[in-house]
Amino acid sequence: MSFSTDIKQEISKRVTETHCRKAELSALLKLTSSLTISNGNLGFVVRTENPTTAKRIVFLLKEIYDAETELQIYKKTNLKKNNVYTIEVHEEGRTILDDLDIYNEKGVQAHPRYDLIMRNCCAASYLAGAFLAYGACNDPQNPNYHMEISLPEIENANFLVKLLSRFQIEAKIVKRRARYIVYVKKADHVSDFLALIGAHDAMMRFEDERIGRDVNNSIRRIDNCEIANEVKTLKAAQQQIANMQKIIDSGRYEHLNEKLRNVIDIRLKYQDSSLLELCEAYQKNYGEAISKSGMKHRLNRIDGIADRLEEQS
């Protein structure tokens, strides 16, 4: 079962107030239904390939309006041969369409009346209905975070983007064939959307995967950084040892002061040690504490002597 299916099943089980149910049903019917005329009566027919969405629409129509519905199932003839669920409402159709502000004397409306989505809970339910109708979300195991809702008209898309912005969720629109896709890419905004529409289990699964991936990436970056530092330390040590050997071979070692000779002796004895380890070894062997900057300064002086020897040769 896909992650999108899990989300739809979860939000279809939400228990909401009547005003929120109306907002949800308004989005569902707006995006999945078309008008019909039977015996002079205006009605509508819903078409969806998602059984969860079909069951939710039938439930809401019954709960809110006690509407009589005709549910039919048929199989598509294309390669996928998906089931298509149709829900027809005739007698109460005009009343429902008018009450949800989907159709009135001015014709089909692009978006609902403000009073339907005035409360934040109702706006969230409208978004839940839109996702139930034509929503999809990448599985959280996919690092390419993506949630989208497919819409038939640009007016629908603009309205949804504006509604999402009320909750500080950033969404964009792209046209895909004859549909307008409202999509969210930022991981934290996808998570906020799932919580907003009541898909809390899906949100927790999404966050678990995201946090786990972020932690693994952080560990990987730390490991890579440590490896890079180790390589850098070894290269520096090899260069220091080569310079020290050059000083010894030239006979200059005996002419150096005691502190520089001690540093050369320690480095040659602990060839793979880091700067901090050299400081610790220096104190242990000579009873003198030395800081990393002090050790670095003496090593630089030794490198400088080796460079001058090379220039003179």
Image: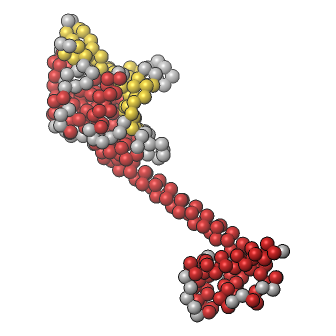
13 or 158, which is in the foreground? 158
Q: Residue furthest front?
A: 312
Which of the image's four quarters has the N terminus?
Answer: top left
> Residue placed farthest to the right in the image?
313
Residue 27: image x %, image y %? 27, 28
Image spot of residue 33 (x, y percent): 30, 20
Residue at the farthest top position: 40
Q: What residue lies at 19% left-to-right and 22% top-to-bottom?
A: 101
Quadrant of image for the C terminus:
bottom right
Looking at the rendering, which quadrant does residue 74 occupy? top left
The picture quadrant where one finds residue 58 is top left
Is 166 left or right of 79, judged from the image as shown?
A: left
Q: Is residue 15 visible?
A: yes
> Total marks drawn?
0
Residue situated in front as seen by the camera: 222 or 12: 222
Coloring scheme of the render?
secondary structure
User: Which residue corresponds to the image point at 75% horizontal and 75% vertical from the top-left?
Assistant: 308
Q: Say left or right for 190 vs 223.
A: left
- Where's residue 102, x and y in %? 23, 20
**Which of the two residues, 138 or 214, is positioned nearer the viewer here?**
214
Mark yes or no: residue 83 visible: no
Q: Residue sitting at 30 percent across and 37 percent down? A: 165
From what the image shows, is residue 124 above or below residue 43? Answer: below
**Residue appearing at x 18%, y 29% in the figure:** 114
